[in-house]
Amino acid sequence: MTDGTSIGALWRGWRDVLTRLGFATAALDAKLLTGHALGLDTLALATREQDGVTDADALRVADLLQRRMSGESVARIIGEKEFYGLPFRLSPATLEPRPDTELLVDLALEHLPPGGRLLDLGTGTGCIPIAVLANRPDATGLATDLNPDALAMAQDNAERNGVAERLDFALGSWFEALVGPPPLIPPSPRWGGTEGGVTAGSSPASGDQFHLITSNPPYIASAVVETLAPEVKDFDPRLALDGGADGLAPYRVIAAQSARFLAPGGIVLVEIGYDQGAAVAKLFADHGFADIAVHKDLGGLDRVVLAHHFKDK
């Protein structure tokens, strides 16, 4: 591309390249990446189609489109993805929030009681607890993740979406984040946090009980990860994909340990793979959970397992 090329001709040229390569969303991808590279929103891109672009402009666009052709998703290239109507920044340490997960948020909003407190395990971008709290100003929560970079991104997203004052963060693997030595990130004044965080025994979750526990854990079997689409296996963090030999390892931990952190009548909601409904439901049943239901997504596939905890049973 050289001086004299218009914005409209530029993005259409890249659309044609992507189309020849078989990208199903070629036009949309070309528009979004051209607009991002040039600092133009959708309206500006449309109204300035006849404006010329410089060589530098064209090179910026080409760089982003080359990344798309390598298999990187548009959301990762832009660094942001919308989820439940809210913007979420991404990093190499986080999965992209996906529309299927919105079912879990729907169920969380339905079952979280007034003034309720939720725990989100393996939070990634923080999309689940942030979406819930953004729609429930009476609720509070705690989000955990094993990866400090993911947890920092979740904190950033909480601040961006106006729920940071009601959402705390803890670093660690599953429930170890609540009771082990990793500090809270960031230290929260509500829990008497000081510079550098708090250590085991002074975590806000020590002895704390939650009305709802949510998680979208890794659920791909280890051997299957390498067979996934390049957009996933080459750019999503493996830590957030690999669920162990059978894809069920995280569910075994969540089913075995959730009860001690749930208030009586509390609920666990976990996202699952399309073929894991029966197996995950059985794990919760084996640990004394009741009224277990498998909810299907809009595509008719098993997507979320809901399990109730009753301490008097």
Image (cartoon, helix red, strand yellow):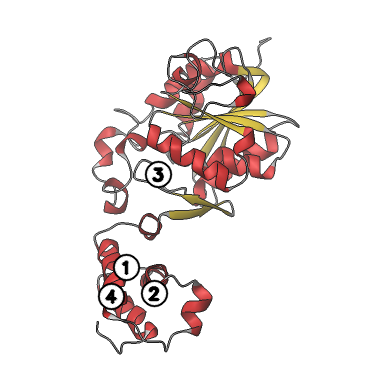
Disc 3 target residue: 95
Q: Position of residue 5 (x, y in %)?
A: 31, 87
Task: Residue at 35% x, 81% y: name it.
Answer: 12
Circle 4 is placed at which residue position?
56
Image height of 182 relative to 298, above or below: above
Instruction: Between label 4 and label 1, give the one nearer the viewer.
Output: 4
Q: Position of residue 279 (x, y in %)?
A: 44, 27
The alpha-carbon separation of the residues under discs 2 and 1 comes to 9 Å
Q: Earlier in the sequence, mark 1 or mark 3?
A: 1
| Image quarter in which the N terminus is found | bottom left
Q: Nearer the viewer, mark 2 or mark 4?
A: 4
Who comes first in sequence, dot 4 or dot 3?
A: 4
Q: Which residue is mark 1?
A: 23
Point 38% across, 46% down: residue? 91
Instruction: Indicate the amino acid at tag 4.
Output: Ala
Query: Helix or strand or loop: what does disc 2 sit on?
Result: helix
Identity, as a three-letter code, of the amino acid under mark 3 = Leu
Distance (Cα) linking label 1 and label 3: 21 Å
Please give the residue where the numbered disc 2 appears in the rendered image.
27
Residue 141 in sight: yes
Q: Is residue 296 visible?
A: no
Quadrant the C terminus occupies: top right
Q: CA distance from mark 4 to mark 3?
A: 31 Å
Label 3: how many Cα within 10 Å (few below 14, some 14–19, many 20+): many
Crowding at dot 1, Cα within 10 Å, few <14 / some 14-19 / many 20+, comes out as some
Where in the figure is residue 33, as x and y percent of width and height? 38, 68
User: Looking at the image, is mark 4 or mark 1 earlier in the sequence?
Assistant: 1
**Separation of residues labelled 3 and 2 (CA atoms):** 24 Å
> Mark 4 or mark 3: which is in front?
4
Does residue 154 appear left or right of residue 229 in this picture? right
